[in-house]
Amino acid sequence: MIAALRRQMTLTRAWLGMVMLLCLAVLLWDIGRSYVEHRRQTVERLTALAKVVEARTEQTFQTLDMLLRETANELPFDRPPGDSGFLRLLKGRSFIFTDALTISVVSPDGTIIHASNVSLVGRNVGERDYLHHFRAHPDDTSMFISKPAVSIANNPVIFTARAIRHDDGRLRAVVLTGINPELLGSLLQSALPSEDSGAIAILRRDGTVLARRPELANTTPGASLAGAPMFQAHITSGNALSVLQGGGGPDQFERLLIIRDTNLHNLVVVVTISAQHLFEPVLKTLVADLIFLIIVGAVVMVLGRFLGGRERQRLQTQRELALARDYYMRVLDHLPVHIWRCDDLGRIDYTNGTLQAYCGATAGDLRPLVHPDDLASWQDANASRLHRRESSEQEFRLRRYDGQYRWMHEVAQPFHHQDGSFAGHLAACLDVTETREAQEKLTQSNAELEQFAYVASHDLREPLRMVSSYMGLIERRLGCKVESDIQEFLAFAKDGATRMDRLILDLLQYSRIGRMSTARRPLDLADCLSVALSNLGVMIDESRARLCIGALPTLNASDDDMVRLFQNLIANAIKYAQPGIAPEIRIDCQREAGSWRLSVQDNGIGIDRTYFDRVFRIFQRLHGRDDHGGGSGIGLSICKKIVESHGGRIWVDSAGTNQGCTFTFILPALNG
């Protein structure tokens, strides 16, 4: 006994040591996870800042480009330089576009022929880079952004220019204006990262710095970062967005950089922070984890001493467990479930009283009692389960004492000795004969329903097509001689046949929900919503609907059912919009316990509270047949059937007429 206690105590110490190692592994994992998560969040934040700077910069240059276009369109070539009428136009433009400096028109040799500042007319600007550019690129019709320079008025400036050419492509004139680099600097200053090492820059594709905040000695406007390794890596990659980390920048520190190409004007936005900031939350996590490890170590030491005392009580506990085992074995004998146990070789060494009563005797071997048609698969499943030492489920027919075979649903679980070695399997069987019969009836019912769907889509529609065709023949045969009331009767008949055909098609679609849908699988609802919006593209464009879409989860669902659900709800919101008001649709999602709550909210005509239940009934409409684009009134019924077939529920809320409404539905979460 003493030797057994010592072995058990040694094993206990080993387990406690493994707990400490596991805690240390968890600590290292937590540190790594904290770093990766913080870096991911930082990249997302810096990318958002880059987008903000891109939007503000493009807005500024788009304004200047519009100014240049309008000036070029109104340029009078038949008037002398410094024409007073054109001067007034340029000054008016200067008052409208306050960000722009002087607006000028320069001849190909660099002479200013018109300017909002009349004192500049006749002066030569010299060899500016925009003149070189337009001479070297006769096909360039876009706006050119120059390197930061000093104007002839001795002011820092970034020129923006557009070329005006003869019909043969020769340069006729250049319309230009400019902005102070400090204007770009102010845009950057408002978007600086919160870290003290944060920096933002706007560059041309050739690496020329247009503006940077904070400004360094080697990053003033006009400096070149073309040789910086990170900038070269971004240009070489050809990607519109690069996330890079490394050194070799202006301050030679290792940095995390977000480099993003703008959509317009061939510019590059760089947002960066020092890589050192990525480790700040890791240090906090490390301190917390070390404290946790110390606490766990202390607990393990105390627990080790405590377990040492408990080991001395183990033998007594084992004796008590033996008595309890005998009691529970008696309980097993009287459970209304067929239970049997086999050893590690597959030999049955126990059957409970319920199974013995079913078989009429002690069943040491079940093979003679298994139906011959099920015997091979039953033996294969048992052999596979025994070989893999894992759980299994199967159904087979087992002969009762009176000779009748009944279906059994068997669930087998492996069990082990106290030392952890494999001991065999414990299996429980339930009589599912009635359930199988019910399933067979349900299968037959589904087959009949599919046959009905076929009749609805083919056989029932054929007479309607014949009625509609003969109505058309009668109408053509009678021609214009028929009386107006007869024409009206024929129109009613054709319209009734058409509506009946539509109702049959809608009913067919309704009957297929859940039966003929694609197989359920984990899928991103955002992809389903994208398909639904693509299907409704024309309807959305014509109604000028605005959609606000939140983040959507991944669920285990049928993709075509989810597309149809979103498509029906969004189409419903557009169809029932208030006259003269563009539809505004908001799609949100919230996590709840074991499920997701999704909602589709609109600003339409709303629904009276008394009709909240009626709108989900099949073929129920709250408006006239031809009001709001018509329809059969089955769309929301399909939505309800889709949601309920996926284990959820759907309802509608509305504050009243012209107050919009919100359709809310709950679907089970992927992992419960």
Image (spheres, grey):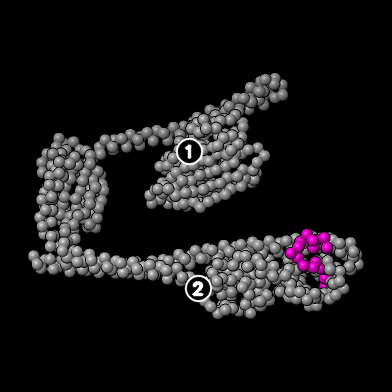
Residue 188 drawn at (x, y percent): 63, 67
Q: Picture quarter containing residue 125?
A: bottom right
On screen, residue 126 above or below 64: below
Residue 118 drawn at (x, y percent): 86, 69
Residue span colored magenta? 90-109
Q: Residues within 10 Å of mark 1 (few under 14, many from 20)?
A: some
Magenta-colored stretch includes residue 136: no
Residue 377 drawn at (x, y percent): 24, 48
Q: Going from the N terminus, do you reach mark 2 or mark 1 first?
A: 2
On screen, residue 179 above or below 321: below
Q: What element does badge 1 sit on?
A: strand
Foreground pick, 411 / 603: 603
Q: Residues within 10 Å of mark 2 (few under 14, many from 20)?
A: some
Q: Residue visible at 84% across and 68% down?
A: 117
Q: Amino acid at mark 1?
A: Trp
Left/right of residue 143 with respect to residue 553 in the rendered view: right
Q: Amino acid at mark 2?
A: Ala
Instruction: Count the labels in the image.
Output: 2
Residue 614 drawn at (x, y percent): 50, 31
On screen, residue 171 above or below 579: below
Left/right of residue 111 with respect to residue 488 in the rendered view: right
**Label 2, label 1: how many angstroms apart (C-alpha)?**
50 Å
Badge number at residue 651: 1
Q: What element does badge 2 sit on?
A: helix
Magenta-colored stretch includes residue 98: yes
Q: Residue visible at 90% across and 65% down?
A: 83
> In the picture, which quadrant includes the N terminus?
bottom left
Residue indicated by mark 2: 275
Q: Residue visible at 42% across and 51% down?
A: 522
